[in-house]
Each structure stands twice: as C-alpha cells, then as structure tokens.
Amino acid sequence: MQPLYRSQQTKPIDAAAADYLQIDSYQLMQRAALAVYRHLPDCETLLVVTGPGNNGGDGWVLAELARQDHKKVLVWALQKPATLSGDAAKAAEDYQGEVVYAAPAEPDQFDVVVDALFGTGLSRAPGGLYQDAIEYINQCQAKVLSVDIPSGLVGDTGVAYIPTVQADKTVAILNMMPGHITADGRDYCGELILDRLAVPERVYADIDPSAYVLKQAMLNLLKQARKHNSHKGSYGRLLVAGGQHGMLGAVLLCGTAALVSGAGLIQLITTQEQAPWVPVHRPELMALGFTGSEHQIHIPPADVLILGMGLGSSQWSKALWQQLMTANIPTVLDADGLNLLADCDEAADSIAVMTPHPKEAARLLNCAVKDIQADRIKAVETLAKRYQCVVVLKGSGTIISDGEENFICPYGSADLATAGTGDVLAGMIGGLMAQGFSALQSAQMAVVWHALTADHCALGRCLTASDLIRHLPEVLI
Ligand SMILES: NC(=O)C1=CN([C@@H]2O[C@H](COP(=O)(O)OP(=O)(O)OC[C@H]3O[C@@H](n4cnc5c(N)ncnc54)[C@H](OP(=O)(O)O)[C@@H]3O)[C@@H](O)[C@H]2O)[C@@H](O)CC1
Ligand SMILES: [K+]
C-alpha cells in the first residue's frame, strides 16, 4: 500500500532519495522541478509564483526549464532572490528570465499558473502578500498547477487555511502526505499525481509512514469463488440492532447491505411494532421485537452484532444497548450506539469496530468537531487506542486505524453525503466480519467497496443509500 508521510518525515525522505540517486540536494530540486514540468498542461505562457522556501526553489528551476523550452515565462517572486537561502537561492540565481515582485496586471494573459509558494514547510495561515497572491491565483482563468501541495493546504492534516490555492493539478514529489487525500485535500488538489523521481519505495523502508492509502486491489479477496461444499451457516450469523420507532429504515439498510455483502444469516432486532414489517420489506431478513427495559431479550447465537443505526436515546434504546453490549458478541458500533457509549463510563470490551462520523467522534473524545477535523489521523488513533478496537472515521478521505497503523481511502465523493449510507457501511463491515474476515480487513474492504460503488454509480447528488446497495455487486465483477 502507498505510504503517506508527515512533513517532519520529508527531510529524511529527501536525504534518502538524494543518497540513492547519488546526487546533491540542488540536483534533487532540479529533478523535482523537471518532474513537475513534465506534467505541465499544454501552454505557451506561464506565470510561476514563488515563495520563501524550497517549494519556491522548485518554481524557479521550473521557470528556467520552461524558458529554455521557449515558453513565455514570468516569475512573480514573493521573496526577493537576495533574501533566499540554500538551494532556493541558487535556483533563483540560475533563472535567466523575467521577474516581477508585484502582482502582474492582466492575470488572464497566462495559460498556466504554477503555484510554488509553500510546500511541506507551511507553518501558519498565509497572510499579507501571500494571502493576496493566493487570492490572485484563484481568480486567474488559467489552469493552476501546484508544486508538491496546493499552497495553504496543511500536508499533515488536510486542513485548508483560508485562502488556499485551488489547483487543477498537483504534482506531489517523492511522497504523498495525508493532507493530499483527507479532510479538505481532495477539494484543493485537483488531479493528484505522485512523481517518485524513479526512487523505489524500499529506499524509505526505515521511515515510518503516518498512514497508508487503501487500494482497490484489496477487493480481489472478495472476488474469489467460495468453497462449493459450503452453506449459509458457513458465512456467519449476524445480528443487526437499532431502529427505534420511525427508524426501521436504518436497520433495514444495514441488514440488506450485510446480506448483499455475503453474510449467511441475518436477524434484525427492532421495536415489537416494527418487527413484523421487516420481512415485508426484505424477505431474506429475520426479525425480533424488543419491547423495552422489562424485556430480557433472548439473544440468538451470533458471530457478529451491528448495533446503533437509528437506535435513538430513549429508555428503549438504552435498555437494548445495555443488554447487547454485555452479550459478549464482537460488535460493530455505529451512530446512536456510539452516542450511548459516549454517555457511559463502562468498559466496552466487545467492540470490534466503531464507525463514527466527526460529530460522533467529537462526542466520544469530548471535544468539538473542528478539533477532530483539525487532525483526523490523531483523532482516529486516539479512539482506536482508547477503545482497543478498529475505528473508521468517516468523511472526505475516510480513515481507518487499529491504533498501530492508519489507512486512508482515496475513493468516494460527496455523493455519499446522503441519509443511510453510513448504515450501509456498517452493514458491509459486519457482513464481512460474519464471513470470517478480521475486523481490520472487513473495515478496509468495506470502506473501499462502499466508496468505489459510489464512484461507479456516478449518480451525483441523486445517489441514495438503496442505490448504493443495489450497485454493490457491480464493483466485484
Ligand atoms: N529538501 C529537498 O531536498 C527537496 C525539497 N523539495 C521542495 O521543497 C519543499 C519544502 O521546502 P521547505 O522545507 O523549504 O518549505 P516551503 O514550504 O518551501 O517553505 C518554508 C518557508 O516558508 C515560510 N513560511 C511557512 N509558512 C508561511 C506563511 N504562512 N507565511 C509566510 N511564510 C511562511 C517558512 O518560514 P518559517 O515558518 O520558518 O517562518 C519557510 O521560510 C517541498 O514541498 C518541495 O516542493 C523538492 O525540491 C525536492 C527536494
Ligand atoms: K505549492
């Protein structure tokens, strides 16, 4: 899997790469700039906006390459060459073309704008001249290409400062960062290209990544034929509990998704009144009614429990939650199941996977949603360590953590921002666990499958959770 590194890991990566290529850091910068230049959209005229560090250095080198390639180039330097240091100073010195130190008039004279303001060294919100430059870039009609990362986007977290360059294309050099694909990253990078400068991944074997990118190929496991000599009992017994009055849809979506994911036997637990309606909607699902706190539920044998979708927070909800959480069944905890967990101090040993969205994560960690989004990796890791389980933090660039390693999904889109898609995901995770996949593997495969199905449907805002379930099989063909 593709590793993602934090900014503090990029210096050792650069050093290891230079060492492997047997070149110095300036030659590495030249290779980086050439790599970015190769991805430049077709153009005659370009503006290269350079900042104070080595990202700016890449820009100066790229500008010289373009000049030598007979393009009409203008560098807009936010920092005078005399104030630059190291490789960036050398790059500015080697540039033989035209330079300006203020915003060029007529921004629409350029075919392409290269954003070389900040890379991995961004340390605060861009203000003053830098803010003006980013706003200028964002107003240009030209195609915008960002060097390494859009300026203003924090590589470690994917938080986009206001303003951040809105790139059409981003060329990441040597390595990618979590911020390229989680939180705001996908909204700012445009087309994302990684250029490793022909340095193999093994060169960084000693450097611990912050996370890995999940891959479509993980789904190959689900494409394998099942043993001919098997039966429904071979694929697990699953309980799906939740759906207080008026919320039957949540457990139906979850149970149906588990069914389509291949789980053998599925029983829904909902209110006494709603239980008879379950087979009417989905004859493959069995149902059990729970009347309330005075009802000691006879819990059927189960390999996995999925708890929380539409569960609510009433006495009925709490009583069902309490009984099931102490039943010692490996549990996928979702939605209101997580909110009830946040309200209690009891140990919850049976949780195998939890699937919070940022608001649920914030309740569990007793902080604000913006604190979760400010560092999604830290949040998911903290939850995984605290509850000793696999955590799936949903949102743009869903992150999975088992407390040791983190995995980010690069697929999916805002098409999934619709009611019930979370219930579907929980059903898929539990459905895969019931078939014998580990909690981590189930979470990884379900997240990728769910996201790719949305991409495959390409229904935009018209996608519904039911569509998603219907199209799941097509991604495995
Ligand atoms: N090393 C190598 O071999 C290679 C590196 N490569 C390239 O280098 C890039 C990393 O370079 P970098 O470390 O110099 O960081 P970079 O992002 O250019 O800027 C840091 C400067 O910006 C400043 N600054 C920060 N925030 C600011 C703000 N809001 N407003 C104003 N100033 C602000 C900060 O100042 P300070 O925070 O120290 O006050 C510092 O002066 C990397 O992304 C890649 O493109 C490639 O060529 C491959 C080879
Ligand atoms: K940049």
Image: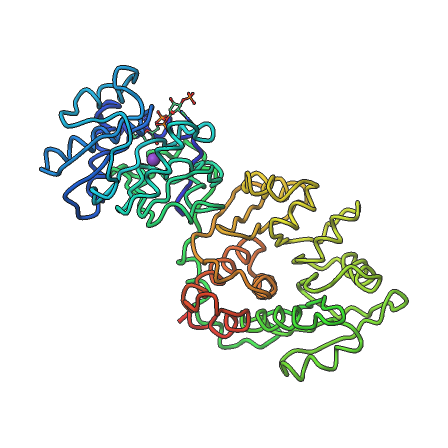
| Closer to us: 174 or 54 | 54
The residue at the far top in this view is 82
In the rendered view of the protein, which quadrant contains the C terminus?
bottom left
Tell me which residue sits at (16%, 41%) in the image. Answer: 45
Is any atom of residue 19 visible in this view? no
* Side (left or right) of 409 relative to 277: left
Q: Position of residue 7 (x, y in %)?
A: 43, 31
Quarter of the image where one finds residue 78: top left
Residue 164 in which image quadrant: top left
User: Relative to the observer, which residue lies in front, 67 or 134?
Assistant: 134
Q: Position of residue 138 (x, y in %)?
A: 35, 42
Q: Residue at x 67, y 57 (%)?
A: 333
Q: Residue furthest right?
A: 294
Residue 58 in sight from this viewpoint: yes
Please indicate whether residue 353 sits to the left or right of residue 276 in the image: left
Q: Give me the residue at 46% from left, 38% from top.
A: 162
Q: Is residue 319 above or below residue 225?
A: above
Of residues 358 and 423, the one drawn nearer to the viewer in this rendering: 358
Q: Tell which quarter ligand 2 is in.
A: top left
Name which quarter of the figure residue 122 lies in: top left
Residue 431: percent from the left, percent from the top?
A: 59, 66
Q: Taking 477 as reference, is 337 above or below it?
A: above
